[in-house]
Image (cartoon, rainbow, N blue to C red):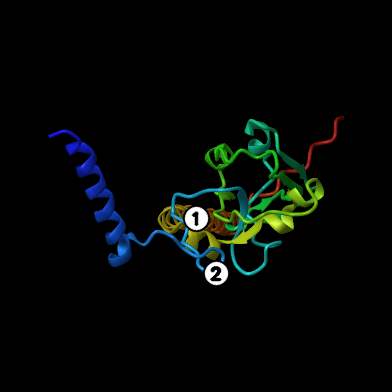
Amino acid sequence: MLGEGIIKGLAETARNFVGSYLDEDRLTTVQYPEERVPAKEAARSFPFLVFDGADPEAGLRCVACQICEKECPPQCILIEKSRDKKPDYIGKPQFYPAVFDIDVSVCMSCQICVEVCPFEAIKMDTEFELSTTDRFGGLVHNRQKLSRSNDHFRAIHPTEAKEVDTRLAADKTKSELKAKADAEARAKAAAAKAANPTSPKPAPVPAV
């Protein structure tokens, strides 16, 4: 029949049109910004720095190794290493970034910085409402603006965050056990040395 395909197509369009009003799962239009669709877990916009605990200064995971700065394709990351050190999450003294800037107007959200970071210190955020009237300084995010808590990371990427938390906890336990074993070994060595003091050497005989 001539035009049968057109009729079938119009019927399918009508069915979908009516169904979009009756089936709640198919109501895809939201009244943004009053209504918002939650971001997918795999979504990514721009990087942020992860810190543990409540203090972004004390808990910042970044040790200013500058690997992400070197590997960044558009070269939008600027890091200056500190002159002093602070304890990291396992208590080991580490350098930290005195300056950590990301120019989000240049960043292409490739996530390479996340993949090369050996300290799980930088992750991809899902925030996308970053418009500003200052197209230069307003789009350069410093360390303070980039810092987000690990709770924020768990909220936006729960699966990845769980894996990272498990791995970091294992590393911390391993480090603590090693430190304890080293301390016990030093204590045993000191006790053995105290129990068996070295006999004094005889005084040299003067030459005649």
Of 55 and 194, nearer the camera is 55
Q: Which residue appears at 44% of the width and 54% of the height?
A: 41
Q: Residue 146 occupies which quadrant of the picture?
A: bottom right
Density class for disc 1 (Cα within 10 Å; few <14, some 14-19, many ≥20) is few
Residue 119 percent location from the top left of the image? 57, 47
Question: For the residue labelled by badge 1, is the local secondary structure a helix, a strand or a loop?
Answer: helix
Q: Of marks 2 and 1, which one's residue comes earlier in the chain?
A: 2
Return the residue at label 2. 34
Q: Which residue appears at 81% of the width and 49% of the height?
A: 137
Q: Determine if residue 83 is in view.
A: no
Is 40 placed left or right of 91 in the picture? left
Q: Determine if residue 178 is in view.
A: yes
Rendered position, 106 above or below 131: above
Density class for disc 2 (Cα within 10 Å; few <14, some 14-19, many ≥20) is few
Of 108 and 4, nearer the camera is 4
Residue 171 percent location from the top left of the image? 48, 52
Screen quadrant of the N terminus: top left
Residue 168 percent location from the top left of the image? 49, 54
**Discs 2, 1 touching: Cβ within 8 Å:** no
Q: Residue 4 occupies which quadrant of the picture?
A: top left
Of 178 and 195, nearer the camera is 178
Question: For the residue labelled by badge 2, is the local secondary structure a helix, a strand or a loop?
Answer: loop
Q: Which residue appears at 39% of the width and 59% of the height?
A: 28
Of 156 and 176, nearer the camera is 156
**How far apart are labels 2 and 1 at the CA level?**
58 Å
Q: Nearer the viewer, mark 2 or mark 1?
A: 2
Q: Residue furthest front?
A: 2
Q: Amino acid at mark 1?
A: Ala
Numbered mark located on residue 181 in the image = 1
Q: Residue furthest left?
A: 1
Screen quadrant of the C terminus: top right
Q: Amino acid at mark 2?
A: Glu
